[in-house]
Image (cartoon, rainbow, N blue to C red):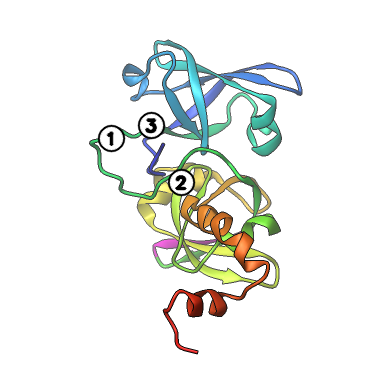
């Protein structure tokens, strides 16, 4: 589990494999002493297992399932990636709970400078849109972000990015049209899963009425 607070920007140094799966050797500067084989690490929001470590680098494997659901197959040597070590049970969760299980791929549809901040708009898969709420959390390439606005018409969301986040993640290298990994809030997904059998026959109002929260 992760928090979406990026600890370092790494660089893809070597990419091995074919269309079905890949191994990546990623160069780092600061987090390598904390990595051991078997550790989990978030790479652009994708939870991967460290296979090997070396001086200022580590190796991870990406399975066919991961390749099909994320942007990792499009990465080439020289690409920059957001990195975060797995959470410690005793540490602070400064962002939100991020599992590193990417739901789908979105696209940047515009970037606008606003004073010292930036406004990003992302088009996301329509199946993920119900899990997005204004002021709710979402992970974009592993970055914990807050949804500033919802645009129903084109299934897009807007994010207000503060200077610190912009400078310390790969967002500063992004441009319109770039694809990104999207993970929606796990609590929203569980809520939808639990309620779906009831919502097929009842409205939210009916459920609240039966539970005694509203009067007939």
The location of residue 63, given as percent across then percent down, is: 65, 24
In the current view of this chain or complex, which residue is farthest to the left? 90
Residue 165 visible, this angle: yes
Q: CA distance from mark 3 to mark 2?
A: 14 Å
The local secondary structure at tag 3 comes to loop
| Mark 1 or 2, closer to the camera | 1
Name the residue tied to disc 1. Answer: 89
Residue 46 falls in image quadrant: top right
Residue 112 visible, this angle: no
Residue toward you, 64 or 140: 64
What residue is rendered at 45% in x and 88% in y?
A: 215
What residue is rendered at 51% in x and 58% in y?
A: 191
Q: CA distance from mark 1 to mark 2?
A: 20 Å
**Marked residue nearer the N-terminal end (3 or 2):** 3
Q: How many marks?
A: 3
Q: Residues within 10 Å of mark 1 (few under 14, many from 20)?
A: few
Magenta span covers which residues?
116-122
The label shown at residue 32 is: none
The label shown at residue 86 is: 3
Residue toward you, 21 or 101: 101
Task: Please tell me whether residue 45 is drawn above or below residue 38 in the rendered image.
Answer: below
**Marked residue nearer the N-terminal end (1 or 2):** 1
Name the residue tied to disc 2. Answer: 143
Is residue 120 inside the magenta stretch?
yes
The location of residue 18, given as percent across then percent down, is: 74, 18
């Amino acid at each position: 589990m992760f928090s979406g607070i990026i600890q370092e920007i790494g660089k893809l140094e070597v990419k091995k494999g074919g269309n079905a799966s890949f191994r990546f050797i990623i160069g780092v500067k600061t987090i390598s002493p904390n990595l051991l084989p078997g550790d989990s690490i978030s790479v652009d929001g994708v939870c991967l297992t460290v296979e090997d470590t070396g001086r200022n680098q580590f190796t991870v494997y990406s399975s066919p399932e991961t390749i099909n659901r994320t942007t990792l197959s499009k990465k080439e040597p020289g690409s920059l990636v957001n990195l975060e070590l797995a959470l410690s049970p005793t540490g602070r969760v400064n962002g939100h709970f991020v599992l590193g299980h990417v739901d789908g791929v979105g696209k940047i549809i515009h970037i606008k400078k606003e004073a010292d901040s930036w406004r990003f708009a992302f088009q996301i898969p329509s199946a993920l849109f119900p899990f997005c709420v204004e002021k709710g959390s979402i992970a974009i390439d592993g970055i914990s972000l807050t949804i500033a606005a919802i645009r129903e018409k084109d299934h897009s969301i807007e994010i207000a990015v503060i200077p610190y986040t912009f400078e310390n993640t790969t967002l500063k290298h992004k441009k319109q049209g770039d694809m990104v990994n999207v993970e929606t809030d796990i609590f929203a997904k569980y809520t939808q899963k639990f309620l779906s059998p009831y919502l097929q026959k009842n409205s939210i109002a009916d459920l609240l009425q039966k539970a005694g929260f509203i009067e007939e």
